Image: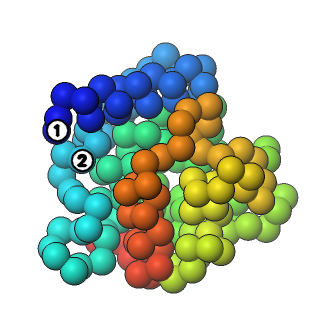
Amino acid sequence: MHRASSGVVVAVQALCLAACGAGASAPADVAPAGSASTADGDAAGAPPTFTAVYTDVLGPTCSICHRPGGIGSFQDFSSRAAAYGAVVGVKASGPSCGSTGETRVVPGDSSGSLLFQKISEASPPCGAMMPLGGPPLPSAQVTLIEDWINAGAQND
């Protein structure tokens, strides 16, 4: 990772920590962004994997707040398995979106998936754009999640 890129990751994590009021670092099983996968999946032309989504986005960026004891504890991203179980085919919960009936991830339909709406729209259908209080995700990360959902949101 280039020095400038790692500085951006650190800045985003610091903003998320400040926004969430959390003083803890990301869980120990969270790999640094970009460490084990690419936005294109593991092979040229292969659909993105959930491992890439978790390793590149959900683990390092989202699990800071979305973990047991975190400000977004109603959605657990503290491990890859917990994160997958918390998003695919699961109705939204929490103070802002719990009563909406929205589904966090609708396999094959990114535009109908609350996760995608909350990272790609300035005014999502409920709650705030994510990451809360930080800059929007880079377009490559948004596209990674969009492509993974549209490819069927498989658990690899």
Q: Helix, strand, or loop for circle 2?
A: loop
Q: Residue furthest right?
A: 99
In the figure, 87 relative to 8: above or below?
Answer: below
The image quadrant that residue 104 belongs to is bottom right
Q: Residue furthest top?
A: 23
User: What residue appears at the point 60 percent right and 25 percent down from the top-left corner?
Assistant: 19
Numbered label attached to residue 117: none
Numbered label attached to residue 1: 1
Which residue is under mark 2?
34
The image quadrant that residue 52 belongs to is bottom left
User: What residue appears at the point 71 percent right and 44 percent down from the top-left corner?
Assistant: 128
**Residue 70 percent coordinates (x, y):** 57, 31
User: What residue appears at the point 57 percent right and 62 percent down from the top-left corner?
Assistant: 116
- The quadrant the C terminus occupies is bottom left
Around disc 1, counting alpha carbons within 10 Å, would you say few (fewer than 14), some (14 to 19), or many (20 or more)? few
**Residue 152 percent coordinates (x, y):** 44, 81
Q: Amino acid at mark 2?
A: Gly
**Residue 56 percent coordinates (x, y):** 32, 50
Q: Are marks 2 and 1 in contact (CB under 8 Å)?
A: yes
In the figure, 5 relative to 10: above or below?
Answer: below
